[in-house]
Image (cartoon, rainbow, N blue to C red):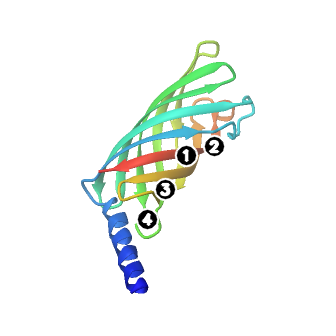
Amino acid sequence: MKKIFIALLLAAFSLGASAQFEKGTKYVGASVSNFGLSYNKYEDFRLGLHALGGYFVADNWLLLGQLGWDHYNGENSFDVGASARYYFKKTGIFCGAGLKFGHVGPDIVKNNLYLTPEVGYCFYLNQNVSIEPAIYCDWSLNHGRDFTKIGLRVGFGYYF
């Protein structure tokens, strides 16, 4: 009896996990990035907050919009961007890429365009909520070496 119950429970979780990545599913998320772990020669500490919203335009393909704020070395950076993610349905691993525009100020006033590849994993807490750790790169196309960042991001996602 115990084996049957566990098998049914696993089947229910696997059916729910695949439903999140179907066409028409909406996504809302928030993430905290860096925790002082980013690589950039000008930074001692960096902390970022980002809000995400998206829509699955096809099975496994999510289009995202993003608003973000970063704080480092007494400076604030604000960014807005768009990206796409592909989810590997059976594993929960995702990879994505996009473009974002960032503005740094007030002391160092720079406008940057970033190419933003990322790789992450969706760990589901229930059928709709996930924790999403990811490794990302914000590759500055304007000021390459000075503003390119590699970091760690931990996000929460809600699929509905």
Callout 3 touching callout 4 (CB < 8 Å): no
First in sequence: mark 2 or mark 3?
3
Spatial CA span between label 2 and label 3: 15 Å
Q: Secondary structure at mark 2?
A: strand
Disc 4 target residue: 88
Please indicate whether residue 43 sits to the left or right of residue 67 in the image: right
- Kindly identify the amino acid type of the residue bearing the numbered disc 4: Phe
Please indicate whether residue 90 sits to the left or right of residue 152 in the image: left
Disc 2 target residue: 151
Looking at the image, residue 13 lies above or below residue 117: below
- Kindly identify the amino acid type of the residue bearing the numbered disc 1: Val
Disc 1 target residue: 154
Please indicate whether residue 44 sits to the left or right of residue 19 in the image: right
Please give the count of numbered marks on the rendered protein. Answer: 4
- The residue at the point 48 percent across, 28 percent down is 79
Q: Secondary structure at mark 4?
A: loop
- Residue 33 location, quadrant: top right
Q: Position of residue 147 (x, y in %)?
A: 64, 31
First in sequence: mark 3 or mark 1?
3
Callout 2 touching callout 1 (CB < 8 Å): no
* Screen quadrant of the N terminus: bottom left
Residue 130, numbered label: none
First in sequence: mark 3 or mark 4?
4
- Label 1: how many Cα within 10 Å (few below 14, some 14–19, many 20+): some
